Image (spheres, grey):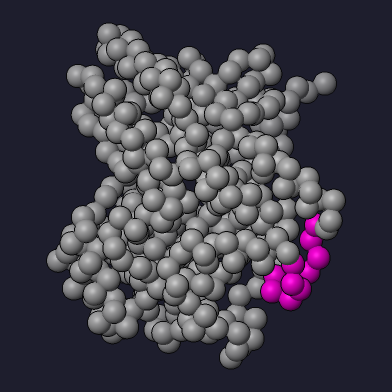
Amino acid sequence: MLNLRQLFLNHNAQTTDFPLSLEITHAEGLYLFDQAGKKYLDLISGIGVSSIGHRHPKVIDAIKNQADRYLHLMVYGEYIQTPQTLLAAKLASLLPSNLSSIYLVNSGSEAIEGAMKLAKRFTGRSEIIACKNSYHGSTHGALSIMGNETFKQAYRPLLPDIRFIDFGEIIEIEKISTKTAAVFIETIQGEAGIKIANKAYWKALRAKCTETGTLLVLDEIQCGIGRSGKFSAFEHYDIVPDILVLAKALGGGMPIGAFISSADIMNALKENPILGHITTFGGHPLNCAAALATLEVLESENLIESVIDKGNLFKTLLIHSEIIGVRGQGLMLAVQLKDFEFNKKVIDECIENGLIVDWFLHCDDSMRIAPPLTISTEEIQSACAIILAAIEKISNKN
């Protein structure tokens, strides 16, 4: 009889020839546990998802309570469903007044697809500008605005009228024109290895979009929901987007995404044609209940207040001759090492010693750190000790 690992390799579609293949039996808080009982501290939150920890009791209770009422009822937007409605209202209360119309979907990629359609429909334009080394998802439209040809070349032709600019470079903003429907941009670039632009850039970008009638679409799929030290990362720069995209941490471990705008813009999907975006499972009651509980936990436990200090503690502790630098904002960090080979060996050593870390798609010389916001000072110290010991061990071997 085949064991679980063999079944996984035989029947689960593989995304690489070298999956991590950790067989996890359960998770709790910051920790994952394998079939042998070994404990792993999850320092990447399942790639930015489990920001309030795995299986937070209030999220589990919300899911169980909703499961006792109803699951799927109808395609999105037809019935008045309590979890969807309360979640949308809660999100609106946490965002600027123009971001009051919430379209709930299943993932970040779907939210990007919906936002692309919305921007083109509302403006009547076709050109979309995105950034080099950006990542917005892997579906056809999202892939079209990804800023790395390595991951795109096998799937061309992709969408037309897509242009790219350098992230954070003010001079590049002049490429935005009255032909541009939208600029899609991560408030903090994630897969580029945590890249941050200054306030002057964001002010200039916002002004240029306003001047040209271009919609500014901020992708906060990774950096939103408190990870930067504010609920929305754009709060650091005193700007407001025309469309905001959220996912990952929003669901507290359940699959959900959202694209958010004003009613005036969102209403473009209602007519000519009607049903401008359709999703069967978007806004699923279980996922919405989990998301609402997640937002309530963020507030009730004051998790965002300590994010900046925790991020600074990582920066203070991660000092080593092999570390070129630690970039980032809040608990969205990149530890730059000399090259991918060295980085991969350090990552493997960390995992062997019970610490889950990872690298970035467009920046493979850097290690990803994005722990649950619930991480304690002692757990940060322990995690950094494991990373430094791994770096020292690999350095001595080379």
Would you identify the image quadrant in which residue 72 lies? bottom right
Expressed as whole percent of the image width and height from the top left, the position of residue 213 reads: 32, 83
Magenta span: 71-81
Expressed as whole percent of the image width and height from the top left, the position of residue 198 reads: 21, 55
Q: Quadrant of the C terminus?
A: top left
State the residue at coordinates (28%, 47%).
195
Q: Quadrant of the N terminus?
A: top right
**Relative to 35, is 339 above or below?**
below
Classify residue 114 as left or right of residue 159. right
**Relative to 376, is 120 above or below?**
below
Classify residue 120 as left or right of residue 300. left
State the residue at coordinates (67%, 14%).
36
Give the dominant element type of the magenta stretch: helix, strand or loop.
loop
Residue 239 located within the stretch drawn in magenta: no
Residue 246 visible? The answer is: yes
Number of numbered tags placed on the structure image: 0
State the residue at coordinates (37%, 69%).
241
Camera-side residue of 225 and 131 = 225
Classify residue 97 as left or right of residue 324. right
**Relative to 249, is 118 above or below?**
below
Expressed as whole percent of the image width and height from the top left, the position of residue 260 reads: 50, 69
Residue 76 located within the stretch drawn in magenta: yes
